[in-house]
């Protein structure tokens, strides 16, 4: 990358930067998990890298307390994670489900955020994955729909109702709210009774507690079982 000293390349022995300090860092996150969880991890990472660069500037140039600004370059879901971090820092979402007021706590050390291919309005592909499963990349087994349904990020990446990406084919003027469980009822056709079934996983959004959801997931599991 033009003009940047990448820590990963140096650690791997690809490039020797000599006495120059690193100015480019790579942050990894688990795309299956909660965006808020990723934002908290990003907060800790940014704080540590900010302190590292500030210390190196003092060591190399004698400048104390330099106002270091970090630029974030984020791809796809990484942009949502970075956006949340800028707006709320490492804060949790309110437990009552309300929309929090932005504090921009995470913007303290950030100069710019560049988002590449970020689904700010949600992604219809995630709906397809939830219905039919998804093969993320060559060489990786397909994630079946019942597995996709256990990932918190699935619901955070769903297309937003207000953008009108999903409509009723019989009534194009009607936008379908994918976050209304009643709209999923026509797809849930399992005859399974739950009196003697122990459901062994759940999700932090509480969707798996709804009988229509659990019925469909177990049906998918049994349908794909060998």
Image (tube, rainbow, N blue to C red):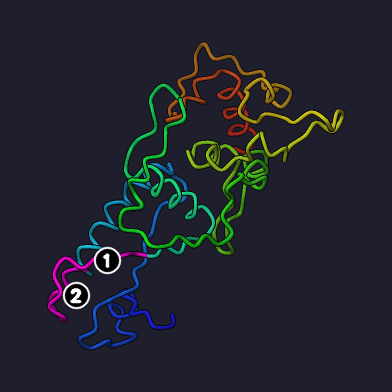
The local secondary structure at tag 2 comes to helix
Outermost top residue: 195
Q: Which of the two discs, 1 and 2, labels the residue nearer the N terminus?
A: 2
Snapshot quadrant of residue 2: bottom left
Which residue appears at 38% of the width and 24% of the height? 95
Q: Residues within 10 Å of mark 2 (few under 14, many from 20)?
A: some
The quadrant in which residue 72 appears is bottom left
- Residue at image x 49%, y 54%? 79
Query: Residue 206's mark?
Result: none
Q: Position of residue 144 (x, y in %)?
A: 59, 43
Asked if the residue at tag 2 contacts the one at tag 1, i.e. Cβ–Cβ closer than 8 Å, the answer is yes
Considering only vertical position in the picture, is 21 above or below 65? Answer: below
The residue carrying mark 1 is 68
Write down the residue under mark 2.
57
Q: Which residues are magenta?
A: 54-70
Against 103, is 21 above or below? below
Pointer 1: residues within 10 angstroms few (<14), some, or many (20+)? some
Q: Nearer the viewer, residue 205 or 215?
A: 205
């Amino acid at each position: 990358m033009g003009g940047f000293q990448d820590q990963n390349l140096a650690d791997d022995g690809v490039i020797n930067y000599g006495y120059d300090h690193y100015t480019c860092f790579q942050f990894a996150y688990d795309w299956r998990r909660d965006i808020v969880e990723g934002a908290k991890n990003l907060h800790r990472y940014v704080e540590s890298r900010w302190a590292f660069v500030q210390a190196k500037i003092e060591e190399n140039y004698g400048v104390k307390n330099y106002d270091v600004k970090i630029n974030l370059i984020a791809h796809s879901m990484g942009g949502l994670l970075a956006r949340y971090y800028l707006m709320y820092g490492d804060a949790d979402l309110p437990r009552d489900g309300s929309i929090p007021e932005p504090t921009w706590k995470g913007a303290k050390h950030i100069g710019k955020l560049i988002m590449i291919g970020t689904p700010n309005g949600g992604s219809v592909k995630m709906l397809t994955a939830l219905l039919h499963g998804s093969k993320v990349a060559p060489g990786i087994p397909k994630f079946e729909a019942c597995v996709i349904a256990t990932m918190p990020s699935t619901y955070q990446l769903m297309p937003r109702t207000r953008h009108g990406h999903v409509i009723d084919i019989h009534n194009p003027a009607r936008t379908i709210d994918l976050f209304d469980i009643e709209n999923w009822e026509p797809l849930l056709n399992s005859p399974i009774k739950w009196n003697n079934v122990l459901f062994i996983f759940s999700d932090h959004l509480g969707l798996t507690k709804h009988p229509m959801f659990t019925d469909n997931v177990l049906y998918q599991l049994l349908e794909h079982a060998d």
